[in-house]
Image (cartoon, grey):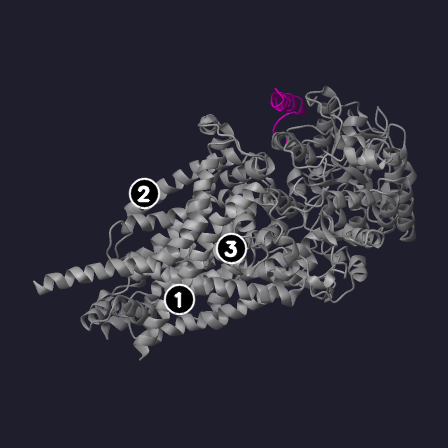
Amino acid sequence: MTIRTGTRTAQRNELLWALLFIVPSMIGFIVFFAMPSVRGLLMSFTNWDLLRPAKFTGLANYIKLLSDKEFRHALRVTAYYVVLNIPLQTVIALGMAVMLDRFTKSTFIRGILILPWLLPNIIVALLWLWMLDPTLGFINQIIMSLGFERQPFLGSVTQAMPTIAGINIWRHAGYTAILLFAGLQNIPKDVYEAAAIDGADERQMFMGITLPLLRPVLIFVLVTSLIGSFQIFDTIVITTKGGPVDATRVVYWYIYEYAFVRFKMGYAATISVALFLILITITVIQMRYFNADTSDLD
Amino acid sequence: MRFRFNALAIALVMVSSMLLAACGGAAAPAAEPTAAAEPAAEATAVPAEEPAAEAPAATDAVTIRYGLWDGNQQPAYEACAAEFTKTNPNIIVKVEQAGWGDYWTSVQTGMVGGTAPDVFTNHLAKYPEFASKEQLVDIQPFVERDGVDLAQYLPGLGDLWGRDGKRYGLPKDWDTVAVVFNKDMLDKAGVTVEELNNADWNASNGGSFGQIIKKLTIDEAGNNALDAGFDKSKVVQYGFVGGGSGGAYGQTQWSHWAVSNGFKFNDGLYATKYFYDDPKLAETIQWYANLNLVEGVAPTLADVRSLGATALFTSGKAAMTTDGSWMIGSYVNDAKFVTGFARLPKGPDGRKSMFNGLADSIWVGSKHQEESWQWMKFAASPACANIVGSYGVVFPAIQSGVDAALKAYGDRKVDVSAFTAQATEANGTFLFPVTDFASEIGPIMDATMDSIMLGEKPAADALKAANDEVNALFQ
Amino acid sequence: MTTRTQTKPGFSTQQIFAWIFLTLVIVVTLFPVWWVVRTGFSSKQEIYVDTFNLLPVGPTLNNFKRVLGMFSSEEAVAQGGTASGMDFWMNLKNSLMVSTTTILGQTFFSAMAAYSFARLKFRFREQIFFLYLTAMMIPGVVTLVPNYILMARELEWMNTYQGIIAPSFLMTPFSVFFLRQFFLSINHELEEAAKLDGASIPLIFMQVILPLSVPALSTLAILQFLGNWNDYLWPFLIGKAENMRTLTVGLAVFQSQTPQGSPDWGGLMAGTTLSLIPTILIFLVFGRRAVNAIQFTGFR
């Protein structure tokens, strides 16, 4: 009996502390994320133009969205970007993280790898805009000195999106690597030692130990970078402004355009709701698929 | 001991955070009713932005916040503001500057949040939107009360800022477009400035201006585009670089060509129908695109899209471009060679430049509309025009200010007569096409012009389709 | 002995491959950063003249002097149209103030929440956690205006530190998610041992979980600190007043003083170089801590 009441008070105790622990972040969440989001949701049912009082328009925006060809185009373009960006970035970052972990823990080298991420987004975009310029850029100079044709990169309908993906991989790979590196630090070293004694080579250790034990962090990286890349915007504002011929008019740009250029905040909110639903669906699938709530260490 | 200390610390942090949050939470609903009752609740924001030391002793002084985006003009308007405060000691003008993109973001969010500047520099592509959304003060009653003479401004400029008997701004300055050339390249090719000033142009073969472009285009072997052996795949110096596809207005890109070919954007101020399907526009745009696509005497759109035509020009990759008068300083300062400005060539319909101008507007949320009007009136008066003109960064809307600007440029040995002659010539200008839906016409025309410039679609077809789309907005 | 001889040869070719990869990555990473520095030292008139020169063209310190406001505004205009420099030290102070406060609060409060989500059992735990995650998926364009209205009208926190700091002081979904994933991978044994000793939950959190997570906490704190350092739109909208500008805002204002057309590359890159220095220092100093800390936890 005493044991049972003991666990019950322990449980009640745990609930109490859990609540107390969540309260501060919950306040931040409610005030700065939930409330504005609810306001955003409400906006999506109105014709708010930012400046005058809004009128309730019911589902009009949503009906418009269903037949909005430009929105579908924007989604396609965004999805294309995500497909270009995520796999390559994750693989490169994972490679970098493993090398850091296995061969050098030098803070200096990690400092170098994080450098691109230390530059403000706007600067990164401007910098690459210049370096990739067809006539005045350094990259094309190298390409030409190797005997190839110079490339239009950001100015070309077909190359613009892969180029933007490349720029963002450059900026984020090192950062992602540092996140993964931190995850690798959590893997007990004796596991590797045991495997080495059993004669496992680097590849076997990577597949058998690193990947499975890194899973919680890897999921984190995949989920956050996927969400982030669906919201690609800054680089596009500076480099292509959605062009050429709408080739880089991604969803986020489309939302921005409606909100701040066309003054149609109501419709911008509707597109945002759609994007939000898409992201939730993808995240749920990801979390389910990777079984995100457990760790293989248990 | 250590344990207890940590537990205590945790409790402290948690309590204080909850207190903090509780205060915030309580403040929000309490503030809501006042905010609703009084849209411009920026009372606390204004003093916070104003360092106390700057304010003179006058306790009843009113501070007017004045927004502009061109950093080059900031010193000029600060000088105006100082002059203004001399005669109006109870009004202090605080100039706030932000670059084009950030400027509009902060003006718009400021209107929503109640923190927009009292008076702000407005643009013709933007103001109809603000006016129709009731964000601008109609200054016509002020103008009539104080008897402001609208005839003091260069012809046409004043009209741009009125609609249906209401008025949203007083003109401050204007700009026109001219040809920018690299003098060294002209000399080398044996083209004189006089020849350039007297050139003519047409959409079928470019006229004598087209010949000059060819003469200035040089390939690796040293042939120019008029020579039989010219290889357009190996150009080292382009005769001309256009500033990109130009979107809906082509202000510095194609509007001067098109209008001098007889094209009209629409039926005038606040028209409800565009004429983008005019064959005269199509042939002009096709000529403009073919400079690259067919002739190879201009760089590709891709080349221009990244760093822009100005960069290509200043890096010595192209001999000529067309640009607006607000860029004079950049060309003169940034290039290592001698840059000059020539008249636009004479088209079938004469020489035509878009005539654009800026004006100040008063935000409806301003708490000091009378004082704002006083400042706005001064900023658009001869006194301020002369000051601004003397800085030589922009052409004021009043003739005496233009003279001051010409003198300032003359002192720096820069000949800007190509711009001023265009502005004062009879029928030398056409006005910026001010209509509703500017923000929606923009994306449609951007994509259309891009596709023509890239050679994906012929101009005639693309423009016809775009015109239908644009005019459908007005239905 | 046999294992050693078996693994060694394979190991070294792999090592060579690894170092080639790493070197390549470092070169690709560093080159554009060098371009920033190079351009900062180049003179304005020559920026486009010799774009293929790896070294500064027309080497000069003028850009740095302009950024630091060491020229009068007439001199600066004569040099290419930038009216005034940025108040670098004031901006630096504001950036330090904002980023430090934000990160201290955010890391601590997020860790508390993350611990609950990872270790404590209560109803709707997963649902609340997922709710937090959804905050990442809300397009910022939509929450920007409501948040701005909240700051400008309801809290009246325009041009205050708390206005800039508040939205990410108590949590970001990113931090909670990151730490939760780490806490999940911490071994249960130590916690159980502490529990048996009668330690309370906050005690376990402070004495067991936090020390064990120093690498994760410091990695997060550094990354969020630097991310915060580069925040632009929010600090710009809330803290535009001269005495509230952070480095990024100061840099943008400085940059925007040049007219439309091509950017003031020299000034911009000089400013960027200057604002990069503190971040690199912070990373090197604290980044080392993050790694070294691992050895002290005695867990691995």
Side (left or right) of B184 relative to A269:
right
> Which mark is drawn over residue A285?
2
The reply to whether residue C150 is in sight is: yes
Query: How far is mark 2 from mark 3, CA to CA?
Result: 27 Å
Tell which subunit mark 2 falls on: A
Callout 1, which amino acid? Val
Residue B139, placed above or below residue A234? above
Q: Which residue is mark 3?
A: A171
Q: Residue furthest bottom?
A: B1
> Which mark is drawn over residue B13?
1
The magenta region covers: B455-475
Secondary structure category for the residue under label 3: helix
Side (left or right) of B405 relative to B81:
right
Looking at the picture, tell me which residue is in the foreground, C123 or B215: C123
Please report the residue visible at 69 percent of the width from the left and 62 percent of the height from the top: B52
Looking at the picture, tell me which residue is in the foreground, A53 or B435: A53
Looking at the picture, tell me which residue is in the foreground, A264 or A39: A39
Tell which subunit mark 3 falls on: A
> How far across and down, in percent of the image, does residue B301 sit?
66, 38
Residue B311, placed above or below residue C230? above
